[in-house]
Amino acid sequence: MGERLLGEWDFAAGNDMGCLREAVRITLPHTWNTDEQLQNRRGRGWYRTELPPCEEGEKRTFVYFRGVYRDAEVYVGDRPVLRHEGSAYTPFGGEITRWLEGDGRGVMTVSADSRFSRSALPYDQSFDWADDGGIFRPVICRRTGAGAILGCRIDTWPVIAPGGGKQRTAEAFLRAEAETDAPEGYRMEWKLEDGAGHTVCEGRADASPSVELSERLESVSLWHFDSPALYTLYLTLKDPRGVPSDERSWRIGFREMKTAGERWLFNGEPVRLPGMEWMPGSDPDHGAAEPWETQEKMLRLLRDSNSVLTRFHWQQDDRVLDWCDEHGLLVQEEIPFWGKQPEGDPEALWPVVKRQLREMIEAHRHHPCVVAWGVGNELSGQTETVRRYVRRAVAEAERLDGTRLVNYVTNTAWDCPFDDASCEGDVLMINDYIGTWHRGLEEETAWRSVLDAHPGRVFVLSEFGLCEPAFAGGDEERERIFLEKLEFYRKIDAIGGTVYFCLNDYRTHMGEDGAGRLRRRVHGSTDWKGDPKPSYFTVKREYAPLTLERCDGGIRVRVRHDIPCYTAQGYVLTDGIRSVTIPDLTPLGREEWLCTFPLDPDKARILRPAGEPI
């Protein structure tokens, strides 16, 4: 039993399977749009691989695709066995046992069609990132015995004491589904372990066909962006003889994010969070098939900017969210519904929206880093059709997952603040390009109209920045805009967070600079390979939660009380040789601390609890 990555494939571009006679050998992940000969191709690409034989005890074969752009057809031999249409970024898969040979061998072929589509999300040409075709994320072959664990719904939440605090009671709900070759006799065993491998709880029950578990845990560590405590849930399905037939595991965490009037509460604490967005798939040498080393480099740059909040315009791979779980980066994950198309009623795409919400939430609900789902971005939010769509999509996401916030991101809040679709979300998320894309507006007047229309609500600045070459000024202008906007946002208590756009220059089919695989928008504080510009260090400085000041008698450490605004726990002051732990500093209590420990003030710096410098 176990999982195998299917990495080696034959590939060819063409209209039908016959093109594979001229195939070349490639390794997944892969996109053809970084090939100079195919960089402008929108059409079909074909992939073929051989499945290895089963090992002892393995009887069933499942395949899972974590990302194919975009319409995918899967064949075993010449038989179509799986189909996934209208969605590039959500995982899909299923069982293919009955189409394989008795020992599990078989030839699997996949067609990926990347043509613009009016029955898909992203819709037609209405999206602002690269549309790289291919199997651009890993493919997994999973083998089990006669019984298999088909899935697991995991919901977790802490029980927060009134007024916050460090309450460590939590609740968990688990529903696991299994499919077996016998109506009875199979049992499901589960175990929850903490990060040190200690068992928190365990149990067993009949598994015909599902198991439900609700546990109240009296002693757990809460997941926090500065101390992301993770647990691992292990499930084992055993056959009537007590022999394991399937095993699976998920990492989980306990945290809570909600609104209370104009306050954003994280684990019960009022917070104002700094953030930035990264646009993946932008290295022109790899495109959407970026190797993990490239993705990890960009994620580390994002977190090292002192950002604790980000959003993704489209669904990400589990590896990305695993990293965010481990390093304390809060995420709003969104379906890729962007722009003013389709003209008229966006509910025409409701079947695709509904399926993508389900696939996204089912796949990623166990990740503690995901604190909100997004149902759209810049969809002409002043129209009644868009408001009706957002209401329906928010309700559907809440039906699927009642433990997280659900939001819509607008760029039209200034037009008529009372009627904008962003009102339908839990948080009003606004893209602010006043001074560039949004012409003819004065910042304070425009914001006053929005704030007056929605008293007692939380706002998040979901985008602000400078896009070149559409607007001039270079990185110096980008830095000026960031500083001026952030200073203004800091004065508005109802603004619970800012997401600066963006970390990197990014590849996009609608970019104003370059052509083919090099077409891009110069919108970042790093280039598209992650080399920082001066504005990156400005973001890092302004987003630091603590500041240092040399003074008589030592070094004074202060916690920020605007943006960012949260309690700093477990931080360390060091000069590289000697170190001292900083006591907890909170904007609502002890705001500063004088360090009299003998440190070199010229070399002093602050480290986050995990050891990274702020």
Image (tube, helix red, strand yellow):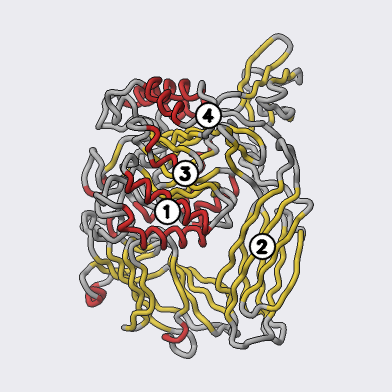
Label 2 – label 3 distance at C-alpha: 32 Å
- C-alpha distance separating marks 3 and 4: 15 Å
Q: Which residue is denoted by mark 1 in the rendering? A: 392
Query: Which image quarter holds the C terminus?
Result: top right
* Callout 1 secondary element: helix
Q: Earlier in the sequence, mark 3 or mark 1?
A: 1
Query: Residue 110 appears in which quarter of the rendering?
Result: bottom left
Total label count?
Answer: 4
When the figure is inspected, residue 361 is found, relative to residue 161, above or below; the finding is: below
The residue at 64%/42% (across/down) is: 224
Q: Nearer the viewer, residue 550 or 389?
A: 389
Q: Secondary structure at mark 2?
A: strand
The type of residue carrying mark 1 is: Arg
Residue 547 image offset from top left, x and y in percent: 61, 22
The answer, for residue 591, to whether it is visible in the render is: yes
Query: Which circle, 1 or 4, is nearer the viewer?
Result: 1
Which numbered circle lies on residue 494? Answer: 4
Q: Is residue 198 left or right of residue 137?
A: right
Question: Distance between the Cα atoms at labels 1 and 2?
Answer: 33 Å
Give the label on residue 425, or none.
Answer: 3
Helix, strand or loop at mark 3:
loop
11 relative to 606, above or below: below
Point 61% across, 41% down: residue: 225
Per the rendering, the mark at residue 233 is 2
